[in-house]
Image (tube, helix red, strand yellow):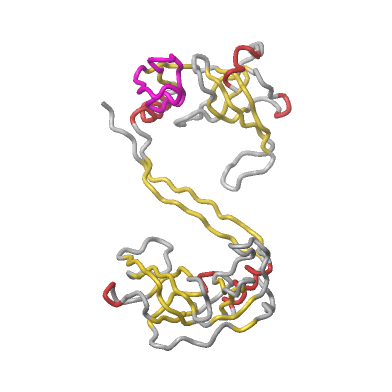
Amino acid sequence: MPEVLRAPLVVEFPFTRSLGPVQSAFLTGLRERTVLGVKTSGGKVLVPPVEYDPVTAEEIRDLVEVAPTGTVTTWAWNPAPRRDQPLRTPFAWVLVRLDGADTALLHVLDAHGPDAVRTGMRVRVRWAAERAGAITDIACFEPYGSEPAAPAAPHDGRFADPVTGIVAPARLDYTYSPGRAPTDYINALAERRTVGERCPSCRKVYVPPRGACPTCGIATAERVEVGPRGTVTTFCIVNIKARSLDIEVPYVYGHIALDGADLALHGRIGGIPYDQVRMGLRVEPVWTEGGRYPDHYRPTGEPDADYDAYKELI
């Protein structure tokens, strides 16, 4: 049996969002070394603040300033920090109820070791040297032997040059192993062949293969070579250029049912003006030198497939 493939995979998406008045005031306040919460109609102070009461769902705008000191309500030790975590040395994840707040804020505590951390310990904010209006303006918390500070005080939320939007980077690093069936599929693509697997019960051929029939739940092992030609079952026209994709817009991305397959796969359709692509168009793969998968699909010149031939694959 061939070795199952493994490869590092990074999924990354920087999410850009605008801020409402409450979140804008909270993040701008952090830039100015001020921690703001919001008071509900029931009198509770929520930190971090939210724009709607979690109990009544009513909109809330009453901002209050809380102290940069607080009490650890619970914690967990992190002995091996990962890339982009707040501290490079081992630290504790902590929930801190700031003085004047009724809820806890999740952040990190710089401590010498797990023996130096306990529920109920007093801590204070350590501000970042450079602040831009983000939760990272709180560099971390640090132990601080103080008594609880005064209650929260009203705040109008006004600051010069308020933060109105943020970019929240989302990234997931992991090692991906496609499994036995997809490994066979990928290895076949390197030979410019497309293989699927047939279900022993319903006899459908799935491409790409999954190792089991999604309908019958039965393991699949019978390999079936399909294509290379196929039929466009449905498609969309892409008008927004992806930052990392060197393809001029507009272009067409479609679902293609390869001959002999009972599941349509997706691919880019080229070699034809985008406004001439249609359902039923017969296509074939175009490979680039050294490519491990088709670069795109182009028309074969055959007559369009009859709708009844592919309607179950849309």
Is 280 above or below relative to 72?
above
**Position of the N terminus by quadrant:** top left
Left or right: where does residue 204 sit relative to residue 42? left
In magenta stretch: residue 208: yes
Residue 168: image quadrant is bottom right
- Which percent across, then down, holds residue 278? 69, 22
Q: Residue at the spot x=69%, y=75% of the render?
A: 161
Is 156 above or below relative to 51?
below
Left or right: where does residue 54 sit relative to residue 213? right
Of 58 and 157, which appears nearest the observer? Answer: 58
Q: Residue at the spot x=40%, y=29% of the render?
A: 186
Disc count in the image?
0
Q: Give the range drawn in magenta.
A: 199-222
Of 310 and 226, which appears nearest the observer? Answer: 310
- Which percent across, then down, holds residue 8? 38, 45
Residue 65: image quadrant is bottom right
**Position of the C terminus by quadrant:** top right
Is 160 above or below relative to 105?
below
Residue 30: image quadrant is bottom right
